[in-house]
Amino acid sequence: MLVLGMHRSGTSAITRVLNLLGVPLGDDLLQAAEDNSKGFWEHNQAVAINEKLFAALDRHWHDIREMPDGWMEHPAALEAREEIAALVRTELGANRLWAVKDPRICRLAPLWLSVVAQEGAEAKAIVVARDPREVALSLQKRDGWTLAHSYLMWTQHLVEAFEATAGVARAMVTYDGLLDDWRGNVQRIGSELGLDWPVAADQASASIDAFITPSDHHHKVGAGHLPVPIKAAPLPPLLEALHARASSVAAGQLGWSALEELRGVYREAASIFSRPVAELVAERNELERLALERMDHINGLVIAKEIIEQREAETGAQLTQVRSMLHAKEIDITGLHVRVEEQAARIQGLALDQRELATLRGALDHEREYIDRAFQMADRIEADLRAQVQVLEGRLLHEQEVHAAAYARLAEAGVQLEAKILDRQAEVQHLREQMDRRAAEMSTLERQLVEKDAKLLEASASYSTHVERSAIELSAAEERNKELASEMSTLERQLVEKDAKLLEASAAYSAHVERSAIELSAAEERNKELASEMSTLERQLVEKDAKLLEASASYSAHVERSAIELSAAEERNKELTSEMSTLERQLVEKDAKLLEASAAYSAHVERSAIELSAAEERNKELASEMSTLERQLVEKDAKLLEASAAYSAHVERSAIELSAAEERNKELTSERNALARQVEAFEGRLARANDQVSRTRWLLGRAWRSLIGVRSGEEL
């Protein structure tokens, strides 16, 4: 059993009801979703087969294009045939009856029915119809489709389901009818399909009543309730008639043949606009594909940019760490300088004797030489690191220049993209011009039809005039006949009256009698001719009346057919015009969004692409450089630790020597202080000795002066 119908038409509901009546659906079913919480009741494998075939044929479930010519012979269709056959064998091998539901089968029904027949199984179909306005509102809410698009999809699915199931047992059911009276509908379906349900309706009624609820009828449209979108886009007459007849078929009021006429109208209209619609849909699909590819590319570049930024942040953190280590080393070196200067100041401040001072100076020079070597090593390390930083900064500057060049290329790419968009717009304009030309052709055909109608009316008027003229002539002939009959009666009367006179004047009137006889004979001949002409005219009139009736019937049928075709073409033209407007509006919106996205992301996209490539190279270089720097840093740290250990040992030795020198200095100071005290004592004794000498000299002078008085001035 194939459950066929447009998406959102109630196919899930009828399929679940069949399942509750004991009809198997298989075990691998599609999971329920938010937009269909009670379940889709679709076989996963069937959906996968249909989707794969659609993709191979460049079609989608929502496509409004006709299926490609010869699609059943396509390699993908042949592969799908084998997969469907395997699925049918599996399901029917385990069950006598199996139902499969997928709205996509409406468009692929010829293939499915062919495979079922090939496998020796009997196919039956249930076609589900729902008000196209409710379907369109449901799809508009779920998928954002326009009403015109959904209307065309609804017609396409229903007509193709009618066409494909013409040779199999089938039943029609409406969504409204199922919700209002599921018992009556399942009984009718079973009767029309010749099936006895495995589970009786009374036995399954509790489960079915629990499954089907009035709240399931969303987007309900009725005479007293027309949502705003429906008022803005009323249902086309063809769809209204198609839905009405489908409902009548489901109610048993009409046969399936009632749908055949509308199917023909749809096919004739579709043949006019199928090519431009296919071109527009292909163009739209291509634009959507390009937009999706660009968005995927943009998202990939955004992720790559985030990775690059993260790596740059990590690299920056590592560089900051290296700089911090360099700064710490500089602080350590500065501390060493301060300590050396302090020791030098302390050493210089010591008052040592020449020998000890020379020894200390030699030790200090040795220590200074060692410290200078350590400083030179630290300077080399610092110079190397600074050189590496300069190289990195130079490379960063080069990358910035590369980025600037990339921005220039991006601008050029933006110009090229804008040119492509202009080309697309030109193509759209070309399609619009084609549609305008087709509209002009339609106008020309309509004008020609009007002209032909006018000529036909003119011919009909001319023929009517001819008929009227013939009727007038016939009436005149009849009047003439009457007049002749009257004249004959008068002549006969005159003959009777003159018979007596003839007896009297036979010789006188013989010539007159002969003339009268001749005139009578001529009148009779004329009467016969008039009778023959009248008979001919009557026959011609009958023939012309028959031809006129035939021409009138043919013309009426032609006019009615032309009116129907013209109405269908006008409706189709309106639909296509509306869809063209919708497509153009969507295209303009998508172009605007694409331009906006391109304007907003073009620089970001190209920059990210270039940054991604450059950053990967940069990352590799930085990783290599960081590895080299880390290795050099480890080596230099080892050397610095070694130098620091040696310097610490030297400092300790210097400190010990300094301490010994300080002790020696203290001893020398003590000795110097002792010598100073001895000198001071000596000076005291010397002063006392000088005082004693001075006193002695004074005593000697006084003694001398005493002697002078003795020797009379003689010097001592």
Image: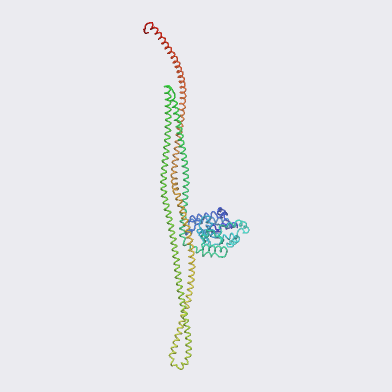
Q: Give whichever of 698, 492 is nearer the camera.
A: 698
Name the residue rendered at 44%, 64% in the picture. Answer: 443
- Residue 31 position, x and y percent, is 56, 52
Location of residue 348 with respect to 406 vertically, above or below: above
Q: Give whichever of 693, 565 is nearer the camera.
A: 693
Name the residue rendered at 44%, 86% in the picture. Answer: 519
- Residue 372 position, x and y percent, is 42, 30
Q: Give whichever of 386, 27 is nearer the camera.
A: 386
- Residue 631 position, x and y percent, is 45, 36
* Quadrant of res 395: top left
Can residue 651 be seen here? The reply is yes
Query: Of all residues shown, which one is farthest toward the bottom?
Result: 504
Q: Give whichever of 81, 598 is nearer the camera.
A: 598
The colour style of the image is rainbow
Can residue 123 be seen here? The reply is no
Query: Which corner quadrant holds the N terminus?
Result: bottom right
- Residue 459 position, x and y percent, is 45, 72
* Quadrant of res 626: top left
Q: How many marks?
A: 0
Query: Which corner quadrant holds the C terminus?
Result: top left
Question: In the figure, is residue 7 to the left or right of 431?
Answer: right
* Quadrant of res 333: top left
